[in-house]
Image (spheres, helix red, strand yellow):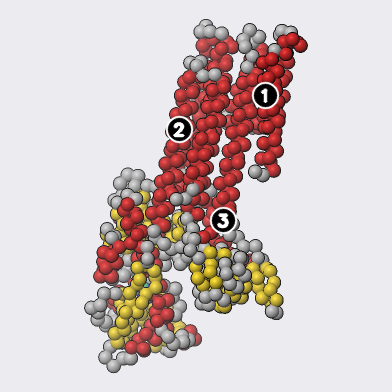
Amino acid sequence: MNKKQKRWRNRIIIALALFAAAFAVEESGLLATLFGTPGDVYASFVLFFVPYLIAGYKTLLEAARNIRRGDPFDEAFLMSVASLGAFAMVFFPDTDPHMAEGAAVMLFYQVGELFQSYAVGQSRKSIAAMMDIAPEYANVEKDGELVEVDPAEVAVGETIVVKPGERVPIDGVVTDGVSQLDTAALTGESVPRHVEPGADVISGCVNMTGVLRVRTTKPYGESTVARILELVENASEKKARTENFITRFARVYTPAVTLSALALAVIPPLAGMGAWSDWILRGLTFLVVSCPCALVISVPLSFFGGIGGASRLGILVKGSNYLELLAHVDTVVFDKTGTLTSGTFNVVAIHPEAGVDPDYVLSMAAHAESFSDHPIAVSVRAAYSGEIDRERIAEAREESGHGVSARVNEHLVLVGNDKLMAEHGAAWHDCDLTGTILHVTVDDEYVGHIVIADVVKEDAEKAIRDLHAAGVRRCVMLTGDRQDVAEAVAARLGIDEVRAQLLPQDKVDAVERLLAGEKNGARLAFVGDGINDAPVLMRADVGIAMGAMGSDAAIEAADVVLMDDRPSKIAQAMRVARKTMRIVWQNIVFAIGVKVLILVLAAFGVANMWLAVFGDVGVAMIAILNAMRCMRAE
Ligand code: ADP
Ligand code: MG
């Protein structure tokens, strides 16, 4: 509890104690002996009004302020009118006094409010704690001394030192040291990751065992940590339809029940159906019950919890609307490279043309690819053991979905698929191996091709299986790769449909067509690593990006980001989304159901104010506790 909540709690405790004392004094009949009748009624009015004011003065002030602003209809208003009304029954001397109820309404309302504020604070805190990944400093080595500086001031390429127990402040590459990294805060993965010189480290992980020297590869603002924090901060702005519905509902509902309560209090006695005091009391009870606290608070709290629960699993959801959409996904479309496959390719074979040295083919390809970030390019460079001198390369161009072209030592080199060859009118011939074929030409002369094969991610098969088990109707794979490679991968993973040899714009068309075929209310998710599929990520109902390896553009364009690039997280994200929606609807039905029941009872004069106040606060508490279940990730 924070300071404000503690003061609030103390106020409630004092008010409760005074209330209990007042109750005891009233029951003892002491007041009647001291003040006689009707003096005892006024004395007990004072006795109950004191704890009432102590507990509720802020709510009363708020209601007054809202009335002055011309926007009176909220919970504070309902509670103030109902409780003041109960006290005002003192003006009907011939009825039983209702001061105790008036004070009780306000007291229990406060208990409920405090509980709410605590629950909201708790779930915020738990997201914040999970997200407690913001590094406070970075250790930079200056003249052999370690200096703590603001991570934002560290330049790219500088070396920082991360000691055991410290958080990696900035993304970079290990240059020295061996250690284990705890990545749980980012990926929900509890198995530590071993790192040694040459390994990439992402900021936000905790260094566990050894001292690491890290050469930074990004400024702090573009490091993983900063990006995640930004995503989480913006998440609460994107509201789900259900959430907006509840807000709109409350706006219409509160004035409506206020008017109904007024009608209930005024019309029957005017029609001569009974005493004024009786009907006014029913109207007041009606007001207490009608307070929509449970709904207004528990729905956003559930979504908040769902987002928090997902982020515990290393799944960042950028807003509650996406959680809602995710729950209705029945088609999942995957990009192949980098999404279902690891994005590192092994060179299977090099087939040079007659009289050409295979090393020459690989060397030319590696040089031409030297400026590309495509997984193919990275793998070709990794397979080439020689030095790459970037000075010797000019006019490097990337043709997405095709390949690359560049001048290497003044020779024009093309590396890519048959589409690239066709486009440049180069001669080439096919290969009978199954794999991705990189044709290489030098100065329009075909020198041979490199056959590479990508490695299916460890959990890709499980990812598809889990999705089918979760009720996803079809899993589709789109790829720019060759048909035979695509079919081999699809068969292995249990993918339902494949479209191969697609250019990036063809992928958008394919997704458009799939979207058009979606049945009412069913949603389509696209999962990609974002290397030239950001447009598709935007177009899908839910765009899911690989966070660790994905490009910045993809993380920007996506609605959901998987921190550790594991496709099996998609089914997990859907489970969290569905659980959240289930809890949201449970709360809506439960809260409205109980309300309607007590409202009807109140209208018929069966429910008294005691039942009303316990109904209201009790329902709110149960709904809040239920909402907090969303946070627990399975
Ligand atoms: P995917 O749809 O599997 O993610 P891309 O659309 O990125 O694949 O690429 C499709 C195809 O284009 C690749 O299979 C490859 O044949 C060719 N290609 C793309 N980029 C490159 C590159 N940098 N070097 C060589 N070939 C490339
Ligand atoms: Mg790709």
Query: What residue is drawn where x is 46% and y is 67%?
Result: 549
In the rendered image, which quarter is residue 495 located in?
Answer: bottom left
Residue 454 visible, this angle = yes
Q: How crowded is mark 2: few (under 14 residues within 10 Å), some or many (20 or more)?
A: some
Q: Distance between the residues labelled 1 and 3?
A: 44 Å
Image coords of residue 507 (percent x, y):
34, 62
Please name the residue that numbered disc 2 is placed on.
Answer: 590
Please name the residue that numbered disc 3 is placed on.
Answer: 131
The answer to whether the residues at label 1 and label 2 have Cβ atoms under 8 Å apart is no
Q: On screen, 44 above or below 462?
A: above
| In this picture, residue 87 sits left or right of residue 279 | right
The answer to whether the residues at label 2 and label 3 have Cβ atoms under 8 Å apart is no
Q: Which of marks 1 and 2 is nearer the N terminus?
A: 1
Q: Which of marks 2 and 3 is nearer the N terminus?
A: 3
Residue kind at label 3, given as amino acid type:
Met
Q: Check residue 20 in the rendering and tell me which mark sits there, or answer none.
A: 1
Q: How far apart are marks 2 and 3 (CA)?
A: 32 Å
Q: On screen, 557 above or below 432?
A: above
Q: On screen, 258 above or below 90?
A: below
